[in-house]
Image (cartoon, rainbow, N blue to C red):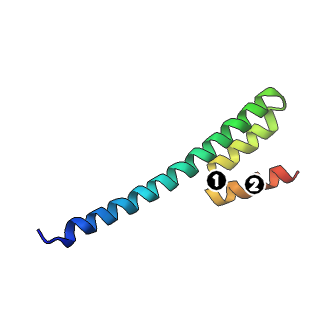
Amino acid sequence: KSPSKPNERQEYFKMSVKEFLEKGSSEQRSLNKRKREQGKSEQGRLTKKRIEQLKTSVLPKSQAYLNKKDQFQR
């Protein structure tokens, strides 16, 4: 029951909360982006773009990001 222990725990808790929030916000952002893209594609040209999206969603994040960037430049 030394005074350093709860302090350490608190520090770790703060850190993990920060990490969680950062992860959550980025997760939410990508989710919103996907929703928006889905909405766009459902209004018009669904097939090809949707298939590409499904492909990118399976790949690891960096690859998906690059593919999306590539899509926007086209």
Q: Are marks 1 and 2 in contact (CB under 8 Å)?
A: yes
Q: How many marks?
A: 2
Q: Is residue 7 above or below residue 30?
A: below
Disc 1: which residue:
59
Out of 64 and 2, give the one closest to the viewer: 2
Q: Position of residue 5 (x, y in %)?
A: 20, 69
Q: Is residue 31 above or below residue 9?
A: above
Residue drawn where x is 21% and y is 72% of the image: 4
Q: Position of residue 1 (x, y in %)?
A: 11, 68
Give the foreground label among 1 and 2: 2
Residue drawn where x is 62% and y is 56% of the image: 61
Out of 27 and 60, give the one closest to the viewer: 27
Q: Label 1 neighbourhood size at 10 Å, few (<14), some (14-19), many (20+)?
A: few
Residue drawn where x is 75% and y is 51% of the image: 68
Disc 2: which residue:
67
Out of 1 and 29, give the one closest to the viewer: 1
